[in-house]
Image: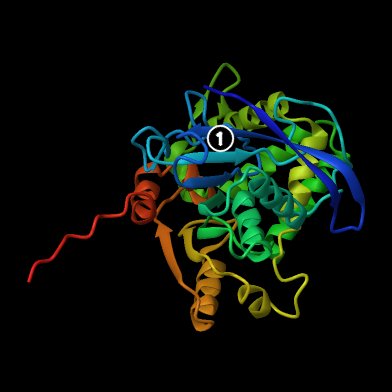
Amino acid sequence: MESLKKIAITNFRSEKGHTYNKIVLTYQLFGKQLHTAPVVLINHALTGNSSVAGENGWWNAIVGDHKVIDTTKYTILAFDIPGNGYKSDEILFEYDAFTAKDIATLFGLAVQQLGIIRLYAAIGSSLGGGIAWEMAVLFPDLIQYLIPIASDWKASDWILGQNKVQTQILNNSKNPLHDARMMAMLFYRTPVSFKQKFNRTKHGVAERFSVESWLLHHGKKLEERFTLHAYKVMIHLLSSIDISKQFNSEEEAFQKIKAEVIMIGIDSDLFFIPKENIETASLLNRLGKQVSYKEIKSIHGHDAFLIEHTQLSYLLNEVFKPKKKQKTTN
């Protein structure tokens, strides 16, 4: 059952150098009572929130009783990214007040304030994965398993370009949220996925192409659950992901990471492309870090982490459902 909780971080200094007397984070807990089981932190994606499990949980195919992230075995912690508008339309900050590094710092401080010494895992998809990367650098001893899914430690030029176009739409369109979301959906899926789903079919009195109706539906759906300000916040945060900013190189940043890194890419992802993930895994391996790269095979592109539940569960089994070692006798 959903129960939104609050925690305050005081005297917080942002990456831009501004000091905030108090920042209130909202969060939810699922599964075992806190401090009675290993804790799994789940960072939500761009249009997600802290409702990761339960009847209306956006990831309830993965998180729940006897699911791969099993709420009968783990405590699940999920924060709302401040400014995402979940349960509140109140505007507390400018849309570009914080960076992904700031959000990671806030989450890490909140975890510590909750009395959690170590997270069994920090897992996040897309933007949430980027924030998890940032946490692994900022709080090296906090995370045992770092699991970024359809994500990366940086916003690539491709993502920066896509976000710039979205921002232009948000600033200039008569229907900013609606139109920006329609454009974004083209990057979250693939041409092959569209062909399988629509195959140039038409429907309705106006005989509109089904793909057009689908995009219009997603534009309207986002309008109903997001404010313009909240969407700008999230797009800005996505563009700000970069764990190497405070270092001389990405290698120097990676040296800070102590967690075992399990990267999960998607072979058809047109947003966080798998080639970037593979390059990151290779670099971490050369630096002597514990790292593995796994891949979802799908025609559905970036959104496959929300669609290919069976594959994702299988890839996560090693961490969340480890096989017990058999006793050997001499």
Q: Which quarter of the picture shows residue 10?
A: top right
Extreme residue in the top direction: 205
252 left or right of 297? Answer: right
Q: Is residue 153 above or below residue 88?
A: below
Residue at the outermost bottom position: 286
Q: Is residue 51 left or right of residue 318?
A: right
Residue at screen point 61% across, 55% down: 132
Circle 1 crowding by C-alpha within 10 Å: few under 14, some 14–19, many from 20 = some
Q: Residue shown at 61%/44% (left/top)?
A: 45
Judge by depth and name the residue closer to the eye, 81 or 184: 81
Q: Please provide percent x and percent y for residue 284.
A: 53, 76
x, y percent for residue 117 = 57, 53
Seen in the image, is 38 located left or right of residue 253?
left
**Residue closest to the eye, 176 or 200:** 176
Question: As drawn, is 242 to the left or to the right of 19?
Answer: left
Give how far across and how far down residue 236 sits, in percent: 78, 50
* Residue that numbered label 1 is attached to: 211
Q: Quadrant of residue 177?
A: top right
Please name whichever residue, 308 or 42, is drawn nearer the observer in this view of the structure.
Answer: 42
Q: Residue at x 64, y 47 (%)?
A: 111
Quadrant of residue 26 within the rendered picture: top right
**Callout 1: helix, strand or loop?**
helix
User: Which amino acid, mark 1?
Assistant: Val
Residue at 46% x, 49% y is 192
